[in-house]
Image (spheres, helix red, strand yellow):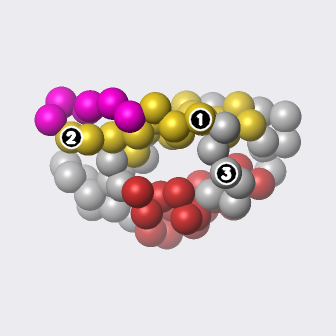
């Protein structure tokens, strides 16, 4: 699963969405989940530690590609 959820630059960060995303990750056993985010707060909603974090740019926005093994 790959997602680029809103993180508060062009679109508002939606904390309800982050909570729902964290709940969905719990149900994805055996999946690899990759999240592109410019909001470090997103990580607190995901119930597992990322397998990898890749810093990158989305235009001029500092972001991270977070990779999870569920």
Location of residue 29 by image quarter: top right
Asked whether residue 26 is in view, the answer is yes
Identify which residue is drawn at 33% across, 30% down. Answer: 56
Determine whether, in the image, residue 26 is placed left or right of residue 22.
Answer: right
| Front residue of 69 and 16 | 69
Image quadrant occupied by the N terminus: top right
| Residue receiving disc 2 | 61
Badge 2: residue crowd in 10 Å (few <14, some 14–19, many ≥20): few
Determine whether, in the image, residue 45 is placed left or right of residue 63.
Answer: right
Determine whether, in the image, residue 46 is placed left or right of residue 41.
Answer: right
Asked whether residue 3 is in view, the answer is no
| Residue receiving disc 3 | 49
Q: Position of residue 48 (x, y in %)?
A: 71, 54
Image quadrant occupied by the C terminus: top right
Q: Main secondary structure of the magenta part?
A: strand
Which stretch is magenta?
A: 55-60
| Front residue of 10 and 55 | 55
Identify which residue is drawn at 25% across, 32% down. Answer: 58
Callout 2 touching callout 3 (CB < 8 Å) = no
Looking at the rendered structure, the secondary structure element under dot 3 is loop
Q: Nearer the viewer, mark 2 or mark 3?
A: 3
**Residue 45, placed above or below residue 34:** below
| Front residue of 2 and 53 | 53
Q: Choose the circle earlier in sequence order: 2 or 1.
A: 1
| Residue receiving disc 1 | 52
Q: Residue furthest right?
A: 30
Badge 3: residue crowd in 10 Å (few <14, some 14–19, many ≥20): some
């Amino acid at each position: 699963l790959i997602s680029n959820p809103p993180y508060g630059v062009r679109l508002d960060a939606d904390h309800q969405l982050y909570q729902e995303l964290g709940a969905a990750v719990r149900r994805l056993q055996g999946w690899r989940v990759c999240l592109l985010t410019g909001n470090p707060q997103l990580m607190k909603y995901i119930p597992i530690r990322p397998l990898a974090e890749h810093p990158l740019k989305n235009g001029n926005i500092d972001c991270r590609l977070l990779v999870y093994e569920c």
